[in-house]
Image (cartoon, grey):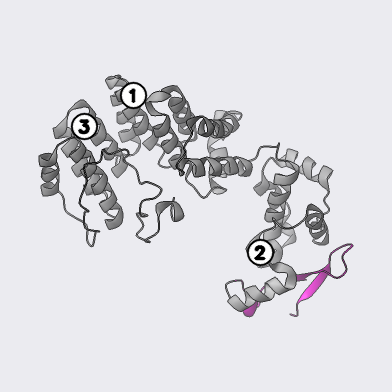
Amino acid sequence: MDKQTLTVPNTPTRTIPVYPGGLRKEDRPNSTDAAERQKRDGMAWRFMGLDDWTTVRIFETFGALGIPLDEPRFRELALRYRSIEELAQTWDENFSVEDLWSDFPFLGAQALWRRITPDIASPETIADVLQTCADLLDGIDRDPETIKTHLKVFTDYLTAFPESEIPEQYEAIQRSLLTDIVWICSTAISLFGDNDPEEAARINHIVQLASPPGGAILLGDMALITARQGNIEDARALLAEQLRREPDAPETYLTAAAFANHVGDYEGMVEHAVKALTLEKDPSYWNTIYTRLAKMFMAAGRQSDLDAVKGRIRIPREPLAPAAISHVPAQSTRVGRNDPCPCGSGKKYKKCHG
């Protein structure tokens, strides 16, 4: 079917291409030629976003698509739905699955929300705050107070809901965020550490209410902080809960090894190290775990124990060769944002799965 057009109100020279019969093969966006053709047709927003569009133009385009909007109406809808995703879904019925304009409701609602109703919290606006927090944690100047302020926006949002609704809201935020929330909170807890254990405990408590995948690692973070404060039995209880929640996660035993090191249980340190390396099957990530454990043993002056670990483990196929380990104290048992991604892509973790 030939391409049809809709004329945008008040701007007769600009038209909106519509493909009512679905995309022809040559119009699919994974084709370089099709992408260039769409840009010439005024569809560059599909590749570049709407940041350079005026609010008036966005309203006019919504109108041409059969969705009348102005600022009062948009604020009314924002207050009703409290979610960019849910608001956009109410308009999705106007578009077929393969309609080139099917992405416009979400992108348009997102742009308008940031401009018109930034005061109305939504999972997507909280995700924006958390992304800023992630960027701060990934930077050189990681000011704890600034990070605490950003995380408080996130935790205040979650705790405004009944506990039964917190997991759903957490998931909605995570869907709008490229960075893993557990990584953000775990890194922040380690940053606060001994200087602000109450803040670390508060963040851990709220995240545990959401019960996210991998969230048990925060229990390990808190266990190490608690142990350094001298509350060994409380730390053991946190480690036991982490083990109960994630008994097959290598990170569980990385934490346990760090705790054993702290209390001088070097036999336990070896056992936990062997367990962590035995559980991890991915060669690239196995190498990362080995490197972190090796740093831990070297910093503790336990080279002979590290040799004992080597003698009890079976290296996965085609791992990266364990690098020479310098005498640098281990700071963390998790993958760093600037470390190679465990997936083996060759990219930094923050640019891939981080």
| Magenta segment includes 170 | no
> Considering only vertical position in the picture, is 38 above or below 154?
below
The mark found on residue 46 in the picture is: 2
Would residue 163 be found to the left or right of residue 342 on screen? Answer: right
| Magenta segment includes 16 | yes
The part of the image, by quadrant, that contains residue 294 is: top left
Count every numbered label the image shows and give the total.
Answer: 3
The mark found on residue 261 in the picture is: 3
The mark found on residue 336 in the picture is: none
> How far, Cα to Cα, is label 3 from label 2?
53 Å
| Region rendered in magenta | 1-29
Would residue 172 be found to the left or right of residue 183 on screen? Answer: right
Residue at the image position 47 percent from the left and 39 percent from the top? 141
The part of the image, by quadrant, that contains residue 241 is: top left
Residue 36 x %, y %: 65, 75
> How far, Cα to Cα, is label 1 from label 2?
49 Å
Secondary structure that dominates the magenta span: loop
Residue at the image position 42 percent from the left and 29 percent from the top? 192
Residue neighbourhood size for the residue with mark 1, other residues' Cα within 10 Å, grouped as few (<14), some (14–19), many (≥20): many
Q: Which residue is mark 1?
A: 226
Residue 14 x %, y %: 82, 69
Residue neighbourhood size for the residue with mark 3, other residues' Cα within 10 Å, grouped as few (<14), some (14–19), many (≥20): some
> How far, Cα to Cα, is label 1 from label 3?
14 Å
